[in-house]
Image (cartoon, rainbow, N blue to C red):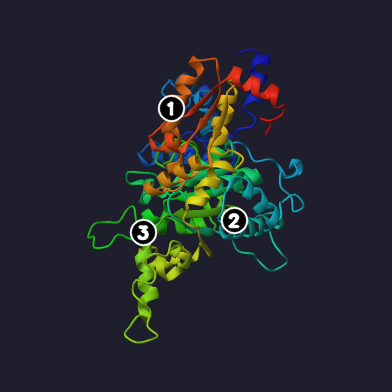
Amino acid sequence: MDDNNKDAHDNKNDDYEKYCYLCRRPESQVGKLIYLPNNINICQDCMQKTFDSFNSGGMQFMDFSNLPNMNMNQFMPVDDIPKKQKVKKKKKKEKKEEPEMTLSTIPAPHEMKAKLDEYVIGQDYAKKVISVAVYNHYKRVLTDTMDDIEIEKSNMLMVGPTGSGKTYLVKTIARILNVPLAITDATTLTEAGYIGDDVESVLSKLLAAADNDVDKAERGIVFIDEIDKIAKKRNTNSRDVSGEAVQQGLLKILEGAEVEVPVGSGSKNAMVPLTTMNTRNILFICGGAFPDIEDIIKARLNKKSSIGFEADLKDKYDKDRNLLQKVTVEDLREFGMIPEFLGRLPILFSLEGLDEDMLVQIMKEPKNAILKQYKKLLALDGVDLRFDDSAYHAIAKRALEKKTGARALRAIIEEFMLDIMYQIPRDDNIGRVTITKDYIEGTGGPVLEMRGTLALEEDEHPGLDAE
């Protein structure tokens, strides 16, 4: 390699740290590395341990004469290490650029909620809670301290039925703030990575979302979904490696600690470099559907039920759609969440179950509503897609029957739009398609209008079709 190519190569890797081949720690942790042929780097600690192992075996000296001629092909050159497993160097303080977010640029809670309203239908209480909590958290992060008063983290726990918008709410808030977001399922986590991932893998995903920039990742958001799946298992004699043990493993991460994180892998045992992340400023949001917790809530609320005029009826709460709104920490403990875990998630709130009117709004009003997506797709073919009001409610009723919340809408709409999306490109004469209630219920078909007819209507009534 000539000098010019060598300089270009060195500049290309300046942004990433070199790391020890043996212990996989980056240069920022272990100090100056010792460079061997074929770009193999060894830290001084590992080199000293190597010397000690030779000396303890009876060898009083080492012969370095053959070192340059050693066969290093068994090692992986630094150039061949995947980029996703390299760690970006931390920026020096004197050259530190102004952070992307400042106290003056953080949206106020009412501004954050207004932006959430553009994407998320209903859930006013949940949007208010998450807006205030996120606002307070990033004020804490950006000021770092307030005199001698240390502000604690605003980790959150969301409880809501499936399809009520838990994940979508977190995705939207991260997009508004332009911070890295990692979404993971608690179902994949096991104690010390028995079969699934280590608990540290949630931080590994956040680091990847931040392009392996540790400084940026330490101000990100982690959303752990399906958190109810790591509740304590009842009536089991086997080791609970995916339940209470995972809750115990998450404690130090939720509270704030220096954690060694594998770069580009979900397991510490993989032969990948490790870097250290401080979770003190990372916002953790946990969410779960907590199935059957309604029975626990009803049992608590019905404790006063007895015989007498002032007694509560046992079936008083059976038809309460928003029973989850009454959930408390005691209910979650009864469900199987340990007190130490709940104590690190101080903000608890619930999302409402979706009714027919909310489902209709979800189809029509958000900026990226699914029906707007289909209208745009057909508009690219020069076709106007419309829906009768009765069709909206017919779709919503079918979605309610599936009991999977807003997720059911997509499946239903995909089903009846399949034939339309297939047939429309075959006939250039079609100018408008109107979806009716009969078509949704399978007793009729969509109303098709030809381009010639629409042109005549436009001539007779100019501006009639303008929306």
Dot 3, crowdedness within 10 Å: few (<14), some or many (≥20)?
Answer: many
Q: Amino acid at mark 2?
A: Lys
Judging depth in this view, the residue of 240 and 351 nearest the camera is 351
Dot 1, crowdedness within 10 Å: few (<14), some or many (≥20)?
Answer: few
Q: Quadrant of residue 33?
A: top right
Task: Quickly name the residue at label 3.
Answer: 231
Q: Quadrant of residue 238?
A: bottom left
**Residue farthest to the front, as pictured:** 460
Nearer the viewer's eye, disc 1 or disc 2? 1
Q: Residue at x 51, y 36 (%)?
A: 20
Quick one: quadrant of the N terminus?
A: top right
Nearer the viewer's eye, disc 3 or disc 1? 1
Task: Quickly name the residue at label 2.
Answer: 127
Q: Amino acid at mark 3?
A: Ala
First reached walking from the N terminus: tag 1 or tag 2: 2
Circle 3 SS class = loop
Image location of residue 49, percent across then percent down: 45, 41
Image location of residue 192, percent across then percent down: 37, 49
Label 1 close to label 2 by CB (< 8 Å): no
Nearer the viewer's eye, disc 3 or disc 2? 2
Above or below for 71 versus 153: above
Using the rendered image of the protein, determine whether residue 182 is visible from the camera's viewpoint.
yes
Task: Quickly name the residue at label 1.
Answer: 418
